[in-house]
Image (cartoon, rainbow, N blue to C red):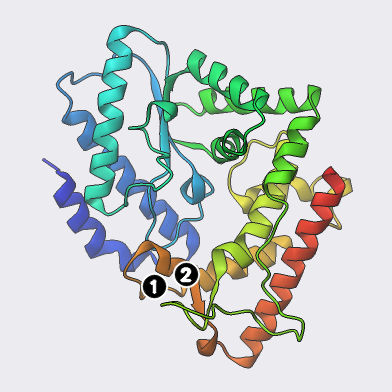
Amino acid sequence: METYESIKEWKNSNLSSFLTNNVSLNTFHDQVMQKVLEVAKGNMKQKRSPCKFTWFITGSGGRFEQALISDQDHGIIYEQSSKENDLYFKQLGEELSYGMDTVGYPYCNGNIMSSNPIWCKSVTDWELQLRKWMGEESWESIRYLQIFYDARALYGSEDYIKQLKAAIYHYQNDNPTLLMRFMENVKHLKNAIGPMGQLLAEQHGSYQGHINLKYTAFLPYVNSIRLLSIKEGICATSTLERIIELQEKEEYKELMKYSYENFMTLMNYRLSLFKVKEYDDTHYLNVKTLTKEQRKELKRILKYGKKLHDEVIELVS
């Protein structure tokens, strides 16, 4: 019988075999997390779930873009609320978060986990919560909506997620100010290239001489493409899948021209960061390790990312 400790051992023993490409690595992460769920369900006093439910992951996991080490971003949607159901899924959410941490997915600093009641609700309560977030003016509510839009089912039906994402799409269609709020939330970028065309590396601390790939490279693509996906009601979660669907629309063909290959290249750069000890290490690339050609390529991708981001912001404004 599997335990969290045996899953961790299996994960650590096999992880290196799945570093050939991003799909392989993320499929492996999915398998590990699904094993965690099975153990978590087995650890419950009530052995059968009282109703249908979906366990979803979001963040980089939801987008199928996890690095070698990844923290937790997940939630639960269950069929209906009752005293029995609410208690069961509260306990399951807490068990899942504990299990994920034990296996090697650190607790999320932002508390985006099934153990947080905000991220563990019945379908009806999720609908009410999304409506509340969409009606509020706070930065946090928009951040939560963006996080939810990257959700995909790891267990159970995808239908609940599709239903809830459709509610966001229809709301923003009738209330254009929501899309503007999404835009305002992702408007500002961390500068990646200096006035002399140089890569802007970290100046201090343990990552001195490194560039933060997450903020300077990935987010301009991830945020702008998510923004267009919300605008167009695209349900896909992976940035690459979203790009493909956007490219099929005539009005975005030119805008998306090099996005797919650029994003694939970024994923490969991050995949090269396999000598890491903790989660933050997966975001930092040492500029000194890059060849002249790689620096040139990275600058081109960063410049294109900024251009894409700026054009999408202008398009939505």
Please tell me which residue is depicted at 58% across the width and 91% down the height of the picture. 291
In which quadrant of the rendered image does the N terminus lie? top left
Judge from the rendering whether residue 277 lies leftward or rightward of residue 225; answer left or right.
left
Mark 1 lies on residue: 274
Image location of residue 77, percent across then percent down: 44, 24
Q: Nearer the viewer, residue 148 or 135?
A: 135
Which quadrant of the view contains residue 200?
bottom right
Please tell me which residue is depicted at 68% across the width and 59% down the height of the picture. 220
Q: Secondary structure at mark 1?
A: loop
Q: Nearer the viewer, residue 2 or 93?
A: 93
In the image, farthest residue toward the top: 82
The amino acid type found where label 1 is placed reads: Phe
Image location of residue 85, percent across then percent down: 31, 13
Please tell me which residue is depicted at 44% across the width and 77% down the height of the picture. 205
Looking at the rendered structure, which numbered label has been put on residue 170? none
Image location of residue 73, percent across then percent down: 42, 43
Image location of residue 236, percent across then percent down: 62, 40
Q: How many numbered circles are shown?
A: 2
Q: Secondary structure at mark 2?
A: helix
Mark 2 lies on residue: 271
Please say if 82 is above or below 4. Answer: above
In which quadrant of the rendered image does the C terminus lie? top right
